[in-house]
Amino acid sequence: MALFADDRRWILAAALSAALGAAQAQEAQSQARAGAVADGVSSAVGIAAGVPVNPLLPILGLGMKAVTFKHAESLPEAERPRAYAMAAAGWQGSAAGNACAAVSVLSGGSFLPACVVVGVAWGYKTWKASERERLEAERCAALRASTRKSKVRCASTRKRVEKPVAPARPVLAAQDIATS
C-alpha cells in the first residue's frame, strides 16, 4: 500500500542512528551542514514512514539550504557564526521534529502534535549551544575594529576537553602489612 511499507522501521532506525552523530558540538558551519543533512534525511524517512506532508517539501528545502549557505558565505566574517547558528538551529530542530513525526506515525500517530514542541526545543538547545562561538566572533570583530587592522588574529577560547586520568595506586610498603 505505502512506499517502503515493509522496511519503514529499518529505514527509521538507520536514519535516527545517523542523526545521533550530528548532535556533537561542532563549529557553526559544520553544525549547520550536519543539520541540513539530518533535516533532509529525516524528511525523506518521514515521508517514507507515511507522515502526511507534501513529498516535494524536501526538494524545496534543498534549494533553500543551498541559498542559505551561499548567503552565509557572503556575510562579513563576524556575522557568519550567527547565520550558521540560526540555520543549524532551524534544521536540527526540524530534523528532530521529523524523526518524532516518523516515530509517531509508525506507532499510531497519537503524539504527532507533540513533535512540534520536540522540534522547537531541539532547535532552541542548538541555538543556545552556539552562544559561546557567536559571542567570540563579536568580540573578535570589536577587537579588529578598535585596532583598525582587519588581519588581527583573535585568540580562541575554545573549551578544552581533558582526558580523565586513572587514579594513582597507593604505594604499599612492607611495614604497612600487619600480620597477626
Image (spheres, grey):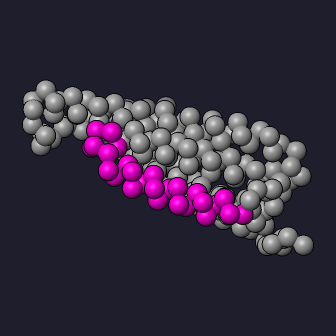
Residue 132 in the figure: left or right of residue 50:
left
Asked if 63 appears above or below 172 in the picture, the reply is below
Residue at image position (70%, 53%) is 99
The one of 79 and 20 positioned closer to us in this rendering? 79
Q: Position of residue 24 (x, y in %)?
A: 48, 48
Which contiguous range is marked in magenta?
A: 55-80
Q: Quadrant of residue 106?
A: bottom right
Residue 71 in the figure: left or right of residue 15:
left
Residue at image position (33%, 39%) is 79
Q: Position of residue 4 (x, y in %)?
A: 79, 73
The one of 61 and 141 positioned closer to us in this rendering? 61
Residue 60 in the figure: left or right of residue 83:
right
Asked if 177 appears above or below 50 in the picture, the reply is above
Q: Position of residue 126 (x, y in %)?
A: 52, 39
Q: Position of residue 93 (x, y in %)?
A: 60, 44
Q: Is residue 167 visible?
A: no
